């Protein structure tokens, strides 16, 4: 009863407060935390459901034992039993009012109230959607690829050799494989269906499996075929047909695979014994590199930087220094800034103690209620839209909303030497499961004619990125062409110029946010525009070469 009372109180509070129920919860860990509260309420509700069902079964079992005892006594001498008027009365009563009571109880669904609770919870609690499930699955696979995580290790709850969670069951692995299949990601389908198969064989007592060996073989066979291995697909299909000889789809696939193999053998004979193509691969035309395209070379650099495997050369590191700076700001003579150089050309610096814990806490509190899925600008239409290469939620805070925001903005001006009148509002971002932002430019390129057209402030001349949390693993900001990575450290801020002095975009500042492997990542940033910077950072007819703004 106490648990039921707590459940009703919590539900009443939720109804009063009006908790939002929809949204892409996988895109921000701040919202994922609320799902644990949802799970807690559902567990309590399930406990109540099981309790009333057990009470019902216990009552019926006691009645059955009572009837069996009486029936056993009667069966030993039926004539003597029914000739006793008391026994006759009790037998008649058992088969009328008593049995009617039992029958009514059997018909009555004692769990109806608890089922209705679940319907009501869906209107007040935060529930993940099928999109969230798919997003969470894709995020886990992204982490697996970026950080080169072994499938079996991930299934055991280990990330980079550290045990973070309980093991995944065969059902968990199967669902991850199924989500990959839905996304036409056959590579990961094969990985996780194989893991599901291995774990299924290790779980002989698992009675909650929602799939069979035949189901796994069907997914594996088709995914293996899509990866180009028709022979293996045929082998798995034959194994499936041994289990289910009349499987219609498998029989159709078997005929198709056999026909494809025969066709390939015929083509190989036509080409010659070596099976070579008519045109060598080296003679194929190679497309000219485009800095806006995330090609495989950049992807490899991006992932290696995220793993900490790619680092600047000793000659790049040699001139880098740490020092106290005042940037010609009188106020900073009392408390100079702690500056660390991260790269010389283009000039990228890290300021330490750039944001204090009390400021971070307040900014987080202000941002949480306003979180919306982070967007990117369509290069053709200029419209803001969501994209699967940016997984996070963001909120925008105006400078005048709080004195803390004003202080942070003034500190940004002191760090950069730039005018904040042409800066965008402070954007606060919380990254979700495997949250990341693939390589991109902060400035608008020439072909993006409609970028920032509503602001009328020119291009983004500079970026200041505040790190508002430590991240256990992952989450670095990496500059793919510079082989430079900045790992999150709470209270620090990275600063760089996006434009050369002649106004052209510096393509070397192309950067990315690595997926968050473990922990939570909070950042905030100020994008500063060209207008108002004419005297603070004068234009030049020549490109600048790493000169600092001040």
Image: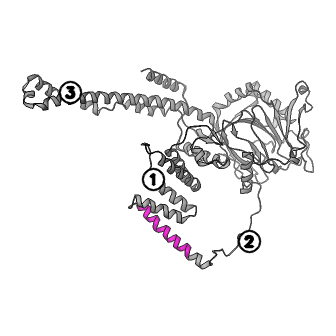
Q: Quadrant of the N terminus?
A: top left
Relative placement, left or right, of 39 versus 433 is left
Q: Is residue 203 left or right of residue 481?
A: left
Q: Earlier in the sequence, mark 2 or mark 3?
A: 3
Which residue lies under the disc numbered 2?
Answer: 283
Q: Which residue is mark 3?
A: 98
Q: Nearer the viewer, residue 374 or 255?
A: 255
User: Along the polypeptide, which appears first: circle 1 or circle 3?
Assistant: 3
**Front tag of 1 and 3:** 1
Residue 332 point in image, percent of width and height:
89, 27
Is disc 3 placed on a helix, strand or loop?
A: helix
Mark 3 crowdedness (10 Å alpha carbons): few <14, some 14-19, many ≥20: some
Magenta-drawn segment: 248-265
Residue 470, above or below 181: above
Residue 404 in the image: state x and y as whole percent: 76, 25
Mark 1, residue position:
213
Q: CA distance from mark 2 to mark 3?
A: 90 Å
Q: Is residue 130 above or below residue 118?
A: below
Q: Residue at x 39, y 61 (%)?
A: 245
């Amino acid at each position: 009863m106490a648990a039921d009372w707590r459940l009703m109180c919590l539900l009443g509070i939720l109804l009063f407060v009006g908790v939002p129920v929809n949204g892409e919860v996988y895109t921000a860990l701040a919202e994922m935390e609320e799902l644990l509260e949802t799970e807690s309420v559902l567990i309590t509700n399930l406990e109540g459901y099981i309790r009333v069902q057990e009470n019902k079964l216990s009552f019926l079992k006691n009645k059955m034992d009572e009837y069996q005892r009486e029936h056993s006594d009667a069966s030993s001498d039926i004539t003597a039993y029914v000739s006793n008027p008391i026994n006759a009365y009790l037998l008649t009563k058992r088969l009328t009012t008593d049995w009617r009571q039992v029958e009514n109880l059997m018909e009555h669904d004692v769990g109806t109230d608890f089922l209705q609770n679940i319907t009501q919870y869906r209107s007040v609690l935060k529930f993940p959607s099928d999109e969230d499930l798919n997003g969470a699955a894709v995020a886990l696979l992204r982490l697996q690829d970026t950080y080169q995580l072994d499938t079996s290790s991930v299934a055991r709850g280990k990330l980079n050799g550290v045990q973070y969670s309980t093991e995944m069951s065969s059902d968990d692995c199967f669902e991850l494989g199924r989500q990959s299949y839905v996304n036409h990601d056959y590579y990961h389908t094969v990985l996780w269906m194989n893991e599901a198969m291995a774990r299924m064989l290790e779980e002989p007592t698992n009675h909650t499996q929602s799939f069979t060996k035949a189901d796994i073989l069907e997914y594996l066979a088709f995914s293996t075929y899509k990866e180009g291995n028709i022979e293996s697909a045929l082998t798995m299909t034959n194994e499936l047909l041994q289990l289910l000889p009349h499987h219609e789809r498998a029989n159709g696939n078997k005929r198709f695979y056999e026909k494809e193999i025969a066709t390939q053998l015929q083509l190989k004979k036509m080409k010659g014994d070596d099976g070579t193509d008519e045109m060598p691969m080296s003679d194929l035309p190679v497309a000219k590199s485009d800095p806006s395209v995330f090609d495989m070379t950049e992807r490899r650099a991006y992932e290696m930087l995220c793993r900490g495997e790619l680092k600047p050369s000793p000659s790049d590191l040699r001139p880098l220094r740490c020092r106290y700076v005042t940037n010609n700001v009188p106020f900073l003579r009392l408390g100079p800034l702690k500056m660390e150089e991260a790269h010389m050309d283009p000039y990228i610096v890290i300021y330490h103690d750039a944001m204090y814990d009390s400021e971070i806490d307040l900014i987080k509190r202000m941002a949480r209620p306003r979180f919306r899925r982070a967007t990117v600008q369509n290069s053709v239409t200029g419209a803001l839209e969501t994209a699967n290469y940016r997984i996070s939620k963001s909120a925008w805070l105006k400078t005048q909303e709080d004195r803390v925001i004003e202080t942070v903005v003034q500190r940004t001006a002191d760090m950069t030497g730039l005018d904040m009148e042409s800066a965008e509002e402070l954007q606060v971002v919380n990254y979700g499961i495997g949250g990341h932002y693939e390589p991109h430019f902060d400035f608008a390129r020439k072909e993006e004619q409609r970028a920032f057209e509503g602001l009328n402030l020119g291009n983004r001349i500079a970026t200041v990125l505040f790190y508002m949390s430590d991240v256990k693993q992952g989450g670095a900001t990496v500059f793919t062409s510079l082989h430079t990575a900045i790992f999150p450290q709470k209270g620090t801020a990275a600063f760089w110029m996006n434009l050369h002095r002649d106004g052209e975009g510096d393509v070397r500042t192309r950067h990315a946010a690595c997926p968050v492997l473990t922990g939570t990542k909070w950042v905030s940033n100020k994008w500063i525009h060209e207008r108002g910077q004419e005297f603070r950072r004068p234009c030049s007819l020549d490109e600048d070469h790493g000169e600092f703004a001040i």
